[in-house]
Image: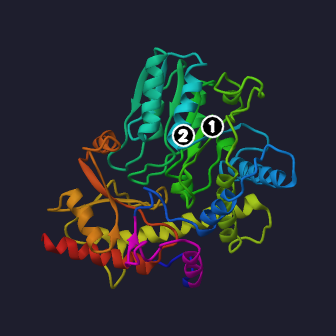
Amino acid sequence: MGKSYFSDALIREIKDRFYYVDTDPQGRRRLFFENSGGSLRLRAAVEAKAEYEKIPDCPERYHDISMQLRAVKEKGIRDIMQIIFGAAEGQGALVTELTSSQCMFRIVRTILENTGGTNVVVSSIEHPSAFDSVTVYAERTGREVRVAKANPETGAVEVEEVLRHVDKDTALISVMSASNITGSIMDIRRLVKEARAISPDVYIVSDAVQHMPHAVLHVSEYGLDGMNFAPYKAFGIRGCGYGYVSDRVAGMPHDKLIAKPEKEWELGTFPHPNFAAMSAVVDYVAWLGSHFTGSDNRKTLYDAGMMAIHKQELTLLHHMLEGSDSVRGLRHIPGVEIYTDTPDTVDRDLIAAIGIKGWDYTALREEYYRRGVTVFERVNTSLYSKRIVESLGLTGCIRVSPLHCHSFADIDRFLEITAAIAAEKS
């Protein structure tokens, strides 16, 4: 039997920092295992946004309150760029939109409207915001679209498969950091290195919406030209998406006010309440990191916190798959099917794609909800899922996505419910 990376006492502290971990907004007992669709909300993030939304002052003015709001904005930008994305100080530019999908479209459009090359490479399991933006702007600029296929056995896109499509005329490569259905983590570091050995000037972007709540990002270390994430899937708030662009992309012609600096991507006044919420997320992860490092450096604390989250989630994933002496894991419950399962779970985020024999996916999702578990079906009748699930050789799956704040007891309850549902069709 495995052991939780977080102590019971720490899990209790963590749960207290989130809304609705054990009950839903109507007070009903619930397991929210749909964090890939929009994670549990950090209390401090919601409260920070609410507090700053009360203030009418414009941060572009010069009195004391406005200057305080400007400081909130500047701290938020540093936290997003240097702490979360991992950009070197002064490197690159921040892209902000209402959604992370809009960020990806804006980044891809800018690159493909301002570069040479005759083809682009994108993976078959990209979120539509990445796959469609690459396809749309490749077609508008007269480039061939090459699709790297996922490995149905692992749920990942192998580096060798991507490189098979890359040549000296490749303008752009887009591969997500981790799959939003299988949790498989892509080897972006190796991909960037080996792709640039083929085409030194190729632009490479990565959708990190799924991966960012589970791991440390490394835009500068890896040499990426673009990346995005969504706060509402990372303990934060809805209504904002963030993107990073490298210096060479930041300086390309793009939508901006004419009088602004060449590498300025800000259009209008950035909302300081949203930045306050993101700083609250970084504060939380740094607080968690303080349990595992004695450093007082904010970036070091954040990285330690994210690494602890990853380790905790690996123990939860292993427990969900293998179970214990008293509760069978998903791999051992008769009738349960696990898709793209691999013996080694190190290169996976906390997601399981499953089915139960005899159950339609939509009916199964409804049955889980009736029993107090929120999960979601990804099926080939959905515009968001069709290409992805079919590229994995599936018609669909139930996506199970807990969060690091969950405990072994929470996983056990899910497994007991799963076994009861499976027994009904046996």
Q: Give how far apart the Cα atoms at labels 1 and 2 are.
A: 8 Å
Q: Overall secondary structure of the magenta stretch?
A: loop
Q: Based on the displayed image, in which of its 4 quarters is residue 222 positioned?
A: top right
Q: Do the residues labelled 1 and 2 touch (CB within 8 Å)?
A: yes
Q: Based on the displayed image, in which of its 4 quarters is residue 333 positioned?
A: bottom left
The answer to if 178 sits in the magenta stretch is no
The answer to if 22 sits in the magenta stretch is yes
Q: Residues within 10 Å of mark 2 (few under 14, many from 20)?
A: many
Quarter of the picture containing the C terminus is bottom left
**Residue 268: percent from the left, percent from the top?**
68, 37
Seen from the viewer's position, the closer of residues 258 and 425 is 258
**Residue 383: percent from the left, percent from the top?**
32, 40
Q: Is residue 129 left or right of residue 378?
A: right
Point out which mark residue 206 bears. 2
Q: Residues within 10 Å of mark 1 (few under 14, many from 20)?
A: many
**Between disc 1 and disc 2, whose residue precedes?**
2
Seen from the viewer's position, the closer of residues 196 and 284 is 284
User: Residue at 77% across / 25% down in the picture?
Assistant: 259
Question: Could you tell me how many numbered marks the image carries?
Answer: 2
**Above-or-below relation of 62 to 316:** above
The kind of secondary structure element at disc 2 is strand
Point out which mark residue 224 bears. 1
| Amino acid of disc 2 | Ser
Point out which mark residue 56 bears. none
Quarter of the picture containing the N terminus is bottom left
| Amino acid of disc 1 | Leu
Identify the magenta region.
9-33
